[in-house]
Image (cartoon, coloured by chain):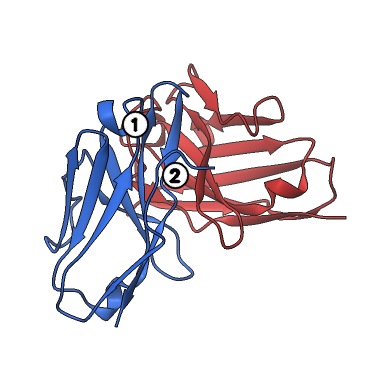
């Protein structure tokens, strides 16, 4: 059974940093691209970032480019999102999502975690 | 602001059919596969339809997808109370080089 478990969310002041983690199990992690998708309270879904199976290809939404960094450790079956210079508009539930292919882009998200909440407020 | 437009809400009685539209452009729906996601209250999204009209294992055939030009449609037949959820379309946008989601549609079973 595919499982994606996010952690690392919490309350953080504007301008500060936070690192999210996603622990994957139930599938061969290094065969697939992975993503972060977020959902602000009461709002819709927004793709944040994607990373290919070997970290060779990475993409970001314009809203986070230059501030967020996605990475993965295939030996630990883990996905990460380093979030710097956080803003109030980054407040959201952050989901880790699996791609059915080894490269990101064009394909859907076939499995999702339950999310970790990030609140940016002073 | 999403580049894919969906109606905010649709509703129907149990057993009836609803359709949800998703309108985009040539840079997204027009030239890429569309997926649909179901988000039950308080839960994570779940893949419902991919590649315009394919259902993942375990998704009942009450759910169907189609695409024509720059629009896509999700259909739900035999509506059940358990279908009350938010539904999102999604696809790759070749011009923006990002994955985009629709604005979301709330389905209510009357």
For residue A19, say whether it is visible.
Answer: yes
Chain coloured red: A
Chain B colour in the picture: blue
Point out the image quarter for the N terminus of chain A: bottom left
Write down the quadrant of residue B67 in the picture. top left
In the figure, residue B31 lies in which quadrant? top left
Residue B57 lies left or right of residue A67; in this view the side is: left
Kindly identify the residue that appears in the image at 26 percent across and 40 percent down.
B71
Give coordinates of residue A33: x percent, y percent: 41, 31
Residue B75 in picture, x, y percent from top left? 19, 58
What kind of element bears circle 2?
strand
Q: Please identify the quadrant where the C terminus of chain A is shown.
A: bottom right
* Residue A40, percent from left and from top: 60, 54
Residue matched to label 2:
A97
Q: Tell me if residue A26 can be seen.
A: no
* Residue occupying the point 68% across, 35% down: A82
Neighbours of disc 1 within 10 Å: few (<14), some (14-19), many (20+): some
Vertical side of B39 occupied by B94: above or below: above
Disc 1 target residue:
B25
Relative horizontal placement of residue A70, taking residue A11 as reference (left or right) = left
């Amino acid at each position: 059974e595919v499982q994606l478990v996010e952690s690392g969310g919490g309350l953080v002041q504007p301008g500060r940093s936070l690192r999210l983690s996603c622990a994957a199990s139930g599938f061969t992690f290094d065969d697939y691209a992975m993503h972060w998708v977020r959902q602000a309270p009461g709002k819709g879904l927004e793709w944040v970032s994607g990373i290919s199976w070997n970290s060779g290809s990475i993409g970001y939404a314009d809203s986070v480019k230059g501030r967020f960094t996605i990475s993965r450790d295939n030996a630990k079956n883990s996905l990460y999102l380093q979030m710097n210079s956080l803003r109030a508009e980054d407040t959201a539930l952050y989901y880790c999502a699996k791609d059915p292919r080894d490269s990101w882009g064009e394909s859907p998200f076939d499995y999702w975690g339950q999310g970790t909440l990030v609140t940016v407020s002073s | 602001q999403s580049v894919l437009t969906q109606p905010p809400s649709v509703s129907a009685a149990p057993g009836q059919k609803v359709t949800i539209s998703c309108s985009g452009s040539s840079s997204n729906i027009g030239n890429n596969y569309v997926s649909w996601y179901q988000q039950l209250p308080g839960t994570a999204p779940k893949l419902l339809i991919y590649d315009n009209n394919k259902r993942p294992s375990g998704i009942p055939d009450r759910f169907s997808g189609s695409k024509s030009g720059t629009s896509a449609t999700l259909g739900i037949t035999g509506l059940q109370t358990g279908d009350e959820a938010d539904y999102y379309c999604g696809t790759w946008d070749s011009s923006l080089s990002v994955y985009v989601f629709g604005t979301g549609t709330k389905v209510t079973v009357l």
